[in-house]
Amino acid sequence: MTDFTELSEEELIRLLRQDRLNAFREIYSRYWKRLFDEAYKRLKSKELAEEVVQELFTNLWTKRQLLQINTTIGAYLFSAVTHQVIDIYRKELVRAKYNQAFKVVHTEADNSTEDAIMLKDLTYTIEEEISHLPDKCRSVYELSRKEHKTNKEIASYLGISEKTVEQHLTKALKKIRLTLSHYLLIAALAFAGKVIQRSIKPAYNTRSYLNSISGLSNACDTFSSVKRKPYLV
């Protein structure tokens, strides 16, 4: 009877590809705690760290026959944890910028009637664009941005894959970004006219909001254009 605790990493990988469950169990036993500690050190959340590691090992088993590991299994797993943590940071950054931009509309009072009209018009423009999204795309977008559900929760709720959820979010954000680009150009021209009339008197609320939206657009560009390296998840 094979003692899997005595096997090398190369042997464990070979047996894992041959559907040997005990090889998977040995890898799990060797690395779970160390991977959890690495994820927790970066995320400062036990729940998120556990979710990252469990998802990593789930994918390790389901994709075992497709594994292409050019280093040690340990280096491969730690690299996968790093990429998952980066993905979490990226998604949280986009969500935070989005929430910050929209919070301005609902929480800051604007003493200027013209500024108030611009803010109201921008909010209407965004909501109108959201309403024109395809049903499934709009559902995914609202569950993510308004109910703050994770991609995994959305996928489970709608009965679709997490990859499909990401595709819907990317499509929605792209359409909103295009709409904002047109609006920001018009708003910038209008603001330039106001600056001349007011002798360069700052219109804080409108500019702050537009800067926030511009930040969201940049974040969306980063999220959509980053060329990801192939890894476990």
Image (tube, rainbow, N blue to C red):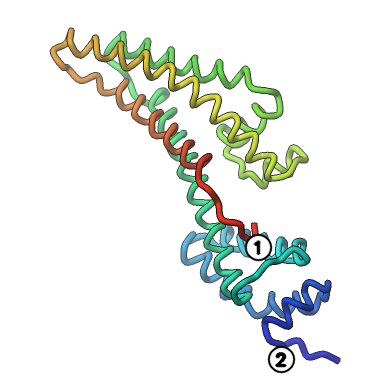
Q: Amino acid at mark 1?
A: Leu
Q: Position of residue 64 (x, y in %)?
A: 75, 66
Residue placed under numbered mark 2 in the picture: 6
For residue 224, side relative to residue 10 (left or right): left
> Gap in Å between the C-alphas at discs 1 and 2?
24 Å
* Residue 179 screen position, x and y as percent: 49, 20
Tag 1, which secondary structure?
Answer: helix
For residue 135, above or below residue 159: above
- Image: 60 above or below 184: below
Which residue is label 1 attached to?
56
Crowding near pointer 2: few (<14 within 10 Å), some, many (20+)? few
Q: Which residue does the image show at 59% across and 29% down from the upper left?
A: 172
Q: Position of residue 206 (x, y in %)?
A: 32, 20
Query: For residue 107, which quarter of the picture?
Result: top left
Return the residue found at the far right. 1
Inspect the image, locate mark 2, and give the three-letter code of the amino acid beneath it: Glu
Question: What is the secondary structure assignment of the residue under circle 2?
Answer: helix
The image quadrant that residue 26 belongs to is bottom right
